[in-house]
Amino acid sequence: MIGLGEFARRLAALDLGDVQREALGHARERLADAVRARLATPPGGPHAAPWMRNGALYDSIAGESDARRVVVGSTSAVARYQELGTRFDPPRPFLAPAAAALAPEIAADIAARLAQAIAELP
């Protein structure tokens, strides 16, 4: 067992930025996969879900992350119309619901990775 002072010294030596970058990189991949899964509805499926017609929207899903944030989105103009709807078509959101559904799991995973890094201090 180590004392509080030694623990504080070891914790200060731990590069939490690296741990956070790794954890958020993992979160980025999980979220991008969840978004893509919501775009896999075949044509004729539930009207509330975006339909996969040619795969372009699916293929446009990408993300980036650093030690502080994760961003997952689409480079396709169609994404906005699917997510928010138009005056002719109702919204068929896929980005926000995926993020909302995964948020508790991702937060728990990030916390677990940070706790593990602290527990493995030499």
Image: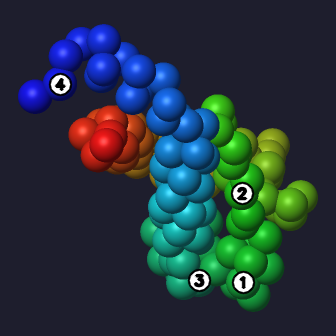
For marks 1 and 3, the one nearer the N-term is 3
In contact (CB < 8 Å): disc 2 and disc 4: no
Q: For mark 1, does the 10 Å Cα neighbourhood hold few (<14), some (14 to 19), or many (20 or more) residues? A: few
Q: Position of residue 17 (x, y in %)?
A: 60, 37
Which disc, if any, is residue 63? 2
> What residue do we see at 73% from left, 63% from top?
62
Q: Answer with the quarter of the image where residue 55 lies.
A: bottom right
Residue 54's place in the image compared with 111, above or below, is: below
> What residue do we see at 81% from left, 43% from top?
87
SS for tag 2?
strand
Residue 74's place in the image compared with 90, above or below, is: below
Q: Which numbered mark, 4 or 3, is in the foreground of this view?
A: 4
Q: Amino acid at mark 1?
A: Gly
For marks 4 and 1, the one nearer the N-term is 4
Which residue position holds label 3?
43
Q: Which numbered mark, 1 or 3, is in the foreground of this view?
A: 1
Which disc, if any, is residue 55? 1
Measure the C-alpha gap from mark 4 to mark 3: 61 Å
Which disc, if any, is residue 22? none
> What residue do we see at 64% from left, 33% from top?
68
Measure the C-alpha gap from mark 3 to mark 2: 26 Å
- Please indicate, yes or no, whether residue 35 appears anywhere in the rendered image: no
SS for tag 1?
loop
Residue lying at the far top of the rendered structure? 5
